[in-house]
Amino acid sequence: MLKRKSYLLSKCARSVLRGLGLLLVAGTSVSAQNMILANPAETTDFRSAFVNPAVLSFQRAQAALGAKVFHLGFADESSPFRQGFVNIGLPFGISKQIGLGLQAQYFNTPLFSQSNISFAMSRRLGYNYAIGVKVNLFSRGFNRDNFDLVDADDPVFRSGTSQWAGTVGAGLFAFPLPYLSFAIGIDHLNRADISLAGDGVNQPLALHLGAVLNVGLFQAAVSGFYEDGRWIPQTSIKTLVHNKGYAMLGFTENSIQAEGQLQLSGPLSLNYSYEYTLFGDAGIGQGSHAVSLIHQFGRGRALPKFELPDEYKVEFRPPDRSMNQESGFYVYSAVDRLEIVEKRLHRQIADDVSKAQLAQLSQYELGVLDSSRTDSATPYEGRAVDLGLIPATLDAPISRKYQRFMGEVAEELIHNDKLKARVITGKESYLRAAGLRRHLRVDAESAGQLGYWEPGYDSVEDSLRANRKIGSGPVRTREALTSLSARSTTFQITPVTRMPRPKTWRLLIRDSNGNIAKTFTGSGLPITEVRWDWHTDSGDLVRPGLYNYHLEWIGPDETTNKTELKYISVQKLLRHITIEVTNHPKRIGADADEVNIILKD
């Protein structure tokens, strides 16, 4: 057995074992495969999922990555201990009732290291209870270099220096009262053999018990861990800071723990914990430091600042998704900002344009509406070409009225140094493009105001539009297109406390004047998801402004309850686009910043 080998270790190795034993007594870590102690009834602590798979159903969807460093002090030696852990929790991983979790952790010392990977599943039973199971893959390996005076043929290491084992665990979570939770987690139900020699050294059962009492923004918790005849109690007091995070102070029989969590930008939070451990007459631990980064899925960034017309301005403070769960339901929208882009295209075809001339134009040249937020001065995109080697001695074959127009463009280039002219031409029209330099003044080209581009297209569809003639088909003079930054939003309705079954419920969406824009109703328990396509009860698309929403429900005693207000901002961009088709181009306005001349074969 490995126990008798401990008498053959070097002085350094004996100090490591001594320190590890003191750690186990203090409760900073445990000798079991689960190397993290946490309250199994705590829903705001991601570490609870390591000891109780059932708590997944009542936690937020999140991913956490953390590390912990131990510093131990002894009379003769000091030894570093390191720990790392990863947690991914998805309370609705399979359905609205079944959640999934993945946890990984490791513990490293100079003498040995161990790791554990857990796959967890939780099942919500109604709104107040959940059960969970998990499967663990546990590994422990020893550093044989730190073992002195050990026979090379010792049977303990005959099969190697590491051991793998699979174990199972289970958990139960309950909200008997809206402000009180109880939980229990059990590990190593199958008591796997973890000895190197296979001589029946089984993993002992591990039991985690916990209770949490919430009173406003304050929380009191008690928990305990029992394994192999040893009981480790733990208590803590936590205060939630609105829109910031929380601070916590915890105690065990041999340690004091201070912890804080700060909400960073968007869904990220940073957790730091310091534990000062006392080992009595055996020595003093210099403490441990743990840092974790938590990403909570579905928690977006704060509502951005934006300008609203005076009639829509409302003084408000967009609330964050608080950790305080006093309301019976928690409601939030997947989209908190909607952008509406409406484009109105007007094609003005002059009377002097013949049907034959119009038939030579393409659909792309007459304007194509899309959902982009901006519009280029020309539908063509492409690459710049250098026509410097082609002499500008040939007159471009253009009519007199266009020669006059080119002269006006040249004057504007001289008097407006911000104006740029771009000649868009294919390879077949390079000579004509070079000839235009005489009309547009060569000086403009040297000053960077004149450039040449070869047309290109973002897609095959755009290429077809640009090269396919309209022909004799009709031309629509007016078109409009409305695009939304999100086609719809989904309101998530999650119960957070125990309460009687509602008789009826309503999800109300109001505009800044208090008028109801949209109502969703139902009887009994509210559905978990409500989809809104941005249309009001009258069937119209929402107007720009600030909207608030909340859930109302009537209980069996005819009392009306409601959640806190949350907000959705709606902004609208209206673009008027006018395309004029004429044989008599107008003079360039003083507000123009770009002129594009398209040469067609």
Image (spheres, grey):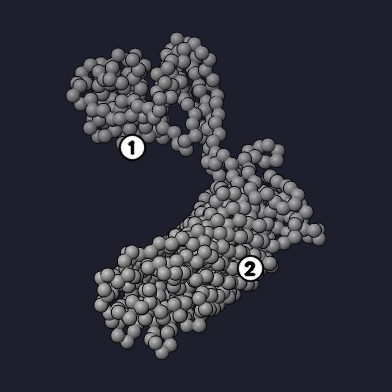
Residue on which disc 1 sits: 418
Q: Which amino acid type is shown beneath numbered disc 1?
A: Lys
Q: Position of residue 260 (x, y in %)?
A: 48, 71
Q: Which residue is mark 2?
A: 181
- In the image, 165 versus 318, the foreground residue is 165
Q: Position of residue 10 (x, y in %)?
A: 27, 79
Q: Earlier in the sequence, mark 1 or mark 2?
A: 2
Q: Residue at x 49, y 11 (%)?
A: 472
Q: Is residue 598 above or below residue 547?
A: above
- 157 sits left or right of 354 in the view: left
Which residue is nearer to you in this view: 354 or 154?
154
In the image, what residue occupies the spot 52% across and 17% down?
475
Q: Position of residue 209 (x, y in %)?
A: 58, 72
Q: CA distance from mark 1 to mark 2?
A: 68 Å
How many numbered markers are drawn? Answer: 2
In front of the other: 317 or 236: 236
What residue is drawn where x is 33% and y is 76%?
A: 5
Find numbered disc 2 in the image and state the secondary structure of the residue it sits on.
Answer: strand
